[in-house]
Every structure is written in C-alpha cells, then in structure tokens.
Image (spheres, rainbow, N blue to C red):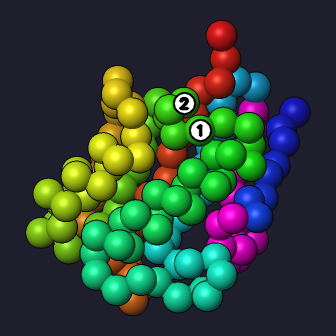
Amino acid sequence: MKDVFFADDAPKPAGPYSHAVRGGDTIYLAGQGPWDPQTGDPPDGFEEQARQTFRNLEGAARAAGASLADAVRIGVYLRDMKDFPVLNKVYEEFVPSPFPARTTIQSDLPGFAIEIDAVLYVGG
C-alpha cells in the first residue's frame, strides 16, 4: 500500500506526479525546483534559488508528516557545478547533522539553477 501527498506550500506539480509518496517506513520526495508557490517565479541568484528549493522540499516532507531531518538520501541537480560551494552552505541551513547520503550532479536544467529530491525514513 502507498499513500500520496501534495503540499499546499510548494508549487503544484508540473506534470503527472505527487509531491511525496509513502511506502511503509519510506517517503520519496519528488524533485523540487526554485519556484515560489505564490508567484510561480524563481528568485534571482543561485543562493536564493537554492533556499527556495529547500523550502519547497520541506513543504513536501511536511505534507507527508516528516521533515528533512528524516532524510537518508538527497539528490541534488545543478545546472552549473561552480555553485557547489554555495549549495553546501545553504544545505547546512536546511539539513541537520548527521547528514544523509547525497549525490550532486550537473544537469541540463532548462531556465533554473537547481533541483533537489530526497528519500526519507520514518520507521523506528
């Protein structure tokens, strides 16, 4: 059995997917980008796009009854790897230690700088 969740405080999905899906003790968060849920626009600059992306990811986690503190894996997709040091700074604002496993790759993101997905564990 699986449960699906949609966050009120994250942008509406841009396609046929759920913000979060729970299967047993695991919650899978769909990739979130930097769009402000109120305006539909991404903020200017990489650092603010990263913060908005993490806020959107947090919203998806909250909708499923969890938080980024429950993350066991995070995937980060950057348009430009030169943003990696700034990503690490913002990452620590939103993801508490002990840190989950993480993969960061360069990706051809059309018109935005960052996307992040996550897997959360909420079991005993």
Amino acid of disc 1: Ser
Determine which residue is flagged by label 1: 67
Q: Tell me which residue sits at (87%, 33%) in the image.
A: 1
Q: Main secondary structure of the magenta part?
A: loop
Q: Is residue 14 above or below residue 77?
A: below
Coordinates of residue 22 in the picture (x, y in percent):
74, 38
Judge whether residue 21 can be spotted in this image. no
Q: Quadrant of residue 39?
A: bottom right
Above or below, 50 relative to 102: below
Q: Distance between the residues labelled 1 and 2?
A: 6 Å
**Left or right of 95 on screen, residue 79:** left
Quarter of the image for the C terminus: give it.
top right
What residue is shown at x 74% (from left), y 43% (from top)? Answer: 64
Magenta segment, which residues? 9-23
Q: Where is residue 77, by image quadrant?
A: bottom left
The amino acid on which the numbered mark 2 sits, given as a three-letter code, is: Asp
Cβ–Cβ under 8 Å for marks 1 and 2? yes
